[in-house]
Amino acid sequence: MKRPSHLAFIRTLSCLICGNPLQTEAAHIRYGDRRAGKPITGMGIKPDDAFVVPLCNEHHREQHSRGERQFWLRHEVTDPIFVALALYRVSGDQETAEQIIQCARH
C-alpha cells in the first residue's frame, strides 16, 4: 500500500544507523519475512510503505550497494522489519518514533 504521508514523516526522522537528522530518506526494506507477512520484492518493485525506515543518504546508498541482510547485520540492526512496522504504527508521532529509532540503534 502506498502512503505518501508516512513516507514524508519518515523523512523527518533521524537515520536509523547513525542518528543523522539531515538528508533522511525513506528506505524500503526489500527482503521478505513471512512472520511479518512481507514478501520478497525485487528490483523495480517497491515494497509496501509499511516496510520503510529512515536512513541518511549515505546509508541508503550502502543499503543498496551490498546484500541487504549483510547491511543490517553490519550495522547491528537485528530486525529492521519490526522497526519499520513500529514506525508505521506511530506515524506522525515524532517523539515516539525517535524513541523507537534510539532503541533500535542499541
Image (cartoon, helix red, strand yellow):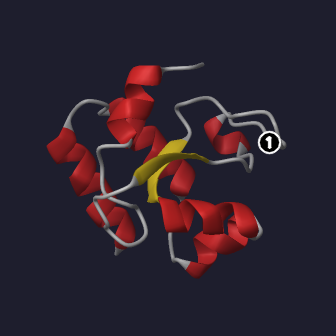
Residue 60 picture quarter? bottom right
Helix, strand or loop at mark 1 = loop
Disc 1 target residue: 40
Spot the residue most to the bottom: 74
Q: Is residue 68 left or right of residue 7?
A: right
Q: Is residue 72 left or right of residue 91?
A: right
Please count the marks in the image. 1
Q: Is residue 101 above or below residue 44?
A: below
Q: Is residue 69 above or below residue 29?
A: below
Q: x, y (%) of residue 86?
A: 39, 42
Three-letter amino acid code at the position of disc 1 = Ile
What residue is shown at x 46% (from left), y 22% (from top)? 4
Spot the residue most to the left: 95
User: Could you tell me which quadrant the N terminus lies in?
Assistant: top right
Q: Is residue 104 left or right of residue 33?
A: left
Q: Is residue 33 above or below residue 16?
A: above
